[in-house]
Image: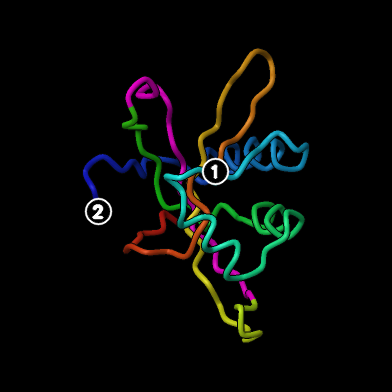
Amino acid sequence: MNQHYNQNYSREQIAEILAMIQDCVREGRFIISKNENRQENIDFINEYNLSSRRQKEILLKIEAEDFCHSLQNTKLGFEQEMLYVFCPQVMLFNFDGIEELVDIYTKFNLIDSDSRKRVVVLSFHKRNKLIDYLL
């Protein structure tokens, strides 16, 4: 496990963080990053033909048990931000119409702006590295 990964959370703390993330998703105050640095997200969404509605469903089904770790953002100018990684397993249909169980690597940036929180989903793709679940 990477020394910068933090798993020092109780189940209650994770549930609270996840509730804030999912409230933002439920209320439409979220975005999944699809810029040139996030091609993996775009490819994943296309490979499984995930509509916006299906993407939202997946995010709302994440559970505290899917939590892996948090880490400090390392991007210049954003070092004060904490990122939260969850990896749910979801049944999806691939491009060939074959159903498969997929580990979805999700990384969330929960942003406090003004009085309303919002979420940027930095990672939303097939797991591509080893992960450790906390719970």
Q: Amino acid at mark 1?
A: Ser
Circle 2 is placed at which residue position?
Answer: 1
Instruction: Indicate the colouring scheme.
Output: rainbow
**Residue at far top of view:** 114
Q: Position of residue 103 (x, y in %)?
A: 49, 68
Q: Helix, strand, or loop for circle 2?
A: loop
Does residue 88 show up magenta in the picture? Answer: yes
Give the CA separation, mark 2 to mark 1.
25 Å
Q: Is residue 54 left or right of residue 15?
A: right
Circle 1 is placed at which residue position?
Answer: 33
Q: Which residues are magenta?
A: 76-92
Q: How many marks?
A: 2
Task: Identify which residue is drawn at 52% across, 62% down.
Answer: 43
Quadrant assignment, res 55:
bottom right
Residue 115 drawn above or below residue 5: above
Badge number at residue 107: none
Task: Identify which residue is drawn at 78% across, 37% down.
Answer: 27
Task: Identify which residue is drawn at 43% across, 40% down.
Answer: 9
**Within 10 angstroms of label 1, few (less than 14), some, or many (20 or more) residues?**
some
**Residue at far left of view:** 3
Does residue 125 show up magenta in the picture? Answer: no
Q: Amino acid at mark 2?
A: Met
- In the image, 86 versus 74, the foreground residue is 74
- In the image, 87 versus 93, the foreground residue is 93
